[in-house]
Image (cartoon, grey):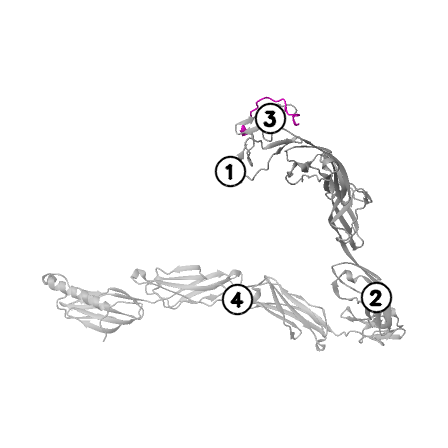
Amino acid sequence: MPGPSPGLCRALLGLWAVLGLGLFGLSAVAQEPFWADLQPRVALVERGGSLWLNCSTNCPRPERGGLETSLRRNGTQRGLRWLARQLVDIREPETQPVCFFRCARRTLQARGLIRTFQRPDRVELVPLPAWQPVGENFTLSCRVPGAGPRGSLTLTLLRGAQELIRRSFAGEPPRARGAVLTATVLARREDHGANFSCRAELDLRPHGLGLFSNSSAPRELRTFALSPDPPRLAAPRLLEVGSERPVSCTLDELFPASEAGVYLALGDRMLSPDITLEGDALVATATATANAEQEGARQLVCNVTLGGESRETRENVTVYSFPAPVLTLSEPSTPEGKVVTVTCAAGAGALVTLDGIPAVVPGQPAQLQLNATEDDDKRSFFCDAILEVDGETLSKNKSAELRVLYAPRLDDSECPRSWTWPEGPEQTLRCEARGNPAPSVHCERPDSGAVLALGLLGPVTRALAGTYRCTAVNVQGEAVKEVTLTVEYAPSLDSMGCPEHITWLEGTEVSLSCVAHGVPPPSVSCVRPGEAGVVEGLLHVVREHAGTYRCEATNAQGSVAKNVAVTVEYGPSFEELSCPSNWTWVEGSGQLFSCEVDGKPEPSVECIGSEGTSEGMLLPLASPDSSPRVPSSASELAPGIYICNATNRHGSMVKTVARHRKWMSPPAQVTRRGWKGPRLQGWPAPPGVARPHKCAAPGRACPGLSGCACPEKMRVPTVAWPPTCMARTHGRSPWAWNTGRWWPSWPPRPPGACGQAGTSH
């Protein structure tokens, strides 16, 4: 037997506490009234559960006692003044057990209250309609059987997670069990596919228990809207046996269109439509075909069903048979000059027409004959048939082509005598010949045998240019034709026809001509930058013609430009300023004779003595781009007459130069303290030094030995002299006067080649 439950233990502890108090105050008990007690007085037990009840009294010696109840008992425990009993499988909504004891000839009683609760294990939502029309009300009903007490129940109807209605049953009798909640809801389009459910909550928290909740299985609502108008049926009124014609059935204001069912049939033959949805519109398309068994009047039916409702449309269709006419040629392919018969026929009831000429009566054929010529090749013949069906006139036609065999013809339209194409882009060379059968065409050069690739796409090159012999051949004969191919290309200026550098000789007559290559022949014009006119015709060459010219060649395919540098050459010429006729050389200056000659190319100059002591002597010349050379001895610069000869490839020129020599006294000595000496101060101040005084005869050597009329003492601070690193000689000026200007009297050294002792002012 299992041990007592925790509830029983709590009841026994209370009982012993009561007995202890009774023993502690026996004297007081005798004076107080006796009572019976039942614990717990009020209990809430889950339906089918169990409960321990403790019945006790303060009577010292009760005669007997017990617990009266209609509930099932599982076990009893007794003491002198108490009784504990377990009640099991409690199912009554409410029961009142009675605890009693017999004490001093009186019956002591204590009445308790036991109530049961049942969780909402079953929450049922009444099934919804299979389809609910949009805009109409439907009922939501939720049942929770047996759950209670009802006063602690709350039911909620939900659309998805949204609460529609919530109701609490507070105030209901304690014995009430189960609950029902009903609501009326307006069906909407957005309710289609929505889940509806019911949630039940049993709140026993005020009784020391928890909150028990449960929900029903969701039920999906399907709403629909169906237009009261019938579908629109588009179908042919006439349907030919063996033909296929499209039919379509359209219904608007349909929701949800994807749930609609479509039935489309022609007579007793059901069609297989393709359904297309466009918003709330449904379009069903199918292909209707008919066989000979269905010939006659038939009905085309379209039925659209949604939500248990349907809309239907019927159209009449006439099925007929109308075979195409038959067109025959006695000789579909014939040589020139042969007679050909053409016949057009159709089925019964049809009236035929051959090339606009009708038959005599319906059902009879139409015929014509012709003598075939070249012009009849590829001639088409047309056969038309007319049939009346159900008030409508139907027509069918057939065509045939006659082929006439003839020898090749090379027309200018299909094979031109001359072709002109630009170089570069791809072209298809075509030379096509008429003839039946189709002739083969072959084009080649008579001279080299080169073949022209006809009908192939390829780049056009200059090598294709030339005259070709084209021959067209078939079984009926051949035709021959000569064609010329011209390839045009943009101008080019090469170094042979238009060199980059041109040399002219002064005084000659020339023309500035550039030869350009190109097809068509390009025009060439040359201009000088900065000048507006074009250089044309013969030019009498002068030195001013030298410079850069821009030559441009242009034709229909483009243009090209090139710069041409023109050089004008001329013979030597002497100028007095650059090569003086009289030259006085001052002894000791170390200066060479400078004779610069104008000419192109640059002339070579040589001066040779012609008489006196200088005869046969070569006069050293100063190079314009090098330092003067000091002669090795005075005899090299002997005075006299020199003949200077300037020569280049365009000629030579001679000039006589008289050379004179003079002596001069040493110039004033220069020291670090300034000028020394009173004599020969007739020259301008050396470079970088201010003139110390206005001397007589400036720019010339002082005549004689007395020198110039200058002050006896002229001092200039040495800081006025430019610092120069030279081979220093004490007391000697670093400058010498000659030919009207100052010259260095000895060559300077590099700045780093001398120390502080070699620096002189």
Q: Is 707 within the magenta? A: yes
Marks 4 and 2: which is nearer the front? 2
Kindly identify the residue that appears in the image at 78 percent across and 73 percent down: 324
Marks 2 and 1: which is nearer the front? 1
- Quadrant location of the N terminus in the rendered image: bottom left
Mark earlier in primary sequence (4, 3) = 4
The residue that mark 4 highlights is: 131
Numbered disc total: 4
Position of residue 494 relative to residue 67, above or below, is above
Q: Which residues are magenta?
A: 698-719
Q: Marks 4 and 3, how far apart in space?
A: 129 Å
Q: Nearer the viewer, residue 57 or 259?
A: 259
Q: Marks 1 and 3, how far apart in space?
A: 29 Å
Mark earlier in primary sequence (4, 2) = 4
Q: Residues within 10 Å of mark 4 (few under 14, many from 20)?
A: some
Q: Marks 3 and 2, how far apart in space?
A: 93 Å
Where is residue 183 drawn, in percent x and y? Answer: 45, 61
Q: Amino acid at mark 1?
A: Gly
The residue that mark 1 highlights is: 755
Cβ atoms under marks 4 and 3 closer than 8 Å? no
SS for tag 3?
Answer: loop
Answer yes or no: is residue 435 visible: no
Identify the disc placed on residue 618. Answer: none
Q: Residues within 10 Å of mark 1 (few under 14, many from 20)?
A: few
The residue that mark 2 highlights is: 447
In terms of image quadrants, where is residue 729?
top right
Cβ atoms under marks 3 and 2 closer than 8 Å? no
Main secondary structure along the magenta-highlighted residues: loop
